[in-house]
Amino acid sequence: MKSFHDFNIYGYGVNCGRREITLKLKQHHDSESGNVILRGVIGHRFENALEGNIVLSIEEYEPLQFHALEGF
């Protein structure tokens, strides 16, 4: 998966029925922007999601790993 570290999130949508999350991202220092669509999502966690937030990581886990995450 391409790294989106340091991209700004300017919007997102969660479609529970389709198990999809769409992230609207823009690179702060240039004009690169676009959407990232995550499919087959069984859970997600956004912390302090406000306009201008910066992506630190997007990680993929197998279901058994996901349930073992601390704080979930």
Image (cartoon, rainbow, N blue to C red):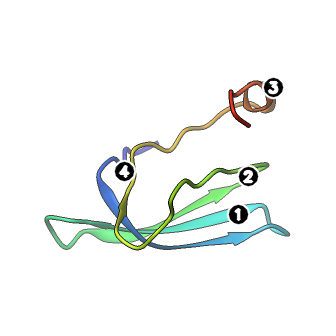
N-terminal-most mark, 1 or 3 = 1
Image location of residue 52, percent across then percent down: 34, 69
Q: Is residue 45 left or right of residue 1?
A: right
The residue that mark 3 highlights is 64
Residue that carries the numbered disc 4 in the rendered image = 4
Q: Which of the 4 image quadrants contains residue 46?
A: bottom right
Q: The disc labelled 2 sits on which kind of residue?
A: Val
Q: Mark 3 or mark 2, which is nearer the start of the sequence? A: 2
Q: Which three-letter amino acid code belongs to the residue tagged 1?
A: Glu
Q: Is residue 53 left or right of residue 70?
A: left
> Which residue is at a point 32% across and 58% down the rendered structure image?
7
Label ID, residue 41: 2
Q: Are marks 1 and 2 in contact (CB under 8 Å)?
A: yes
Label 4 sits on a secondary structure element that is loop
Name the residue tied to disc 1. 20
Mark 1–mark 4 contact, CB under 8 Å?
no
Question: Quick check: 45 above or below 28?
Answer: above
Disc 3 + disc 4, Cβ < 8 Å: no
Query: What secondary structure is found at the residue carrying circle 1?
Result: strand
In this view, 64 is above or below 21:
above
Of callouts 1 and 2, the N-terminal one: 1
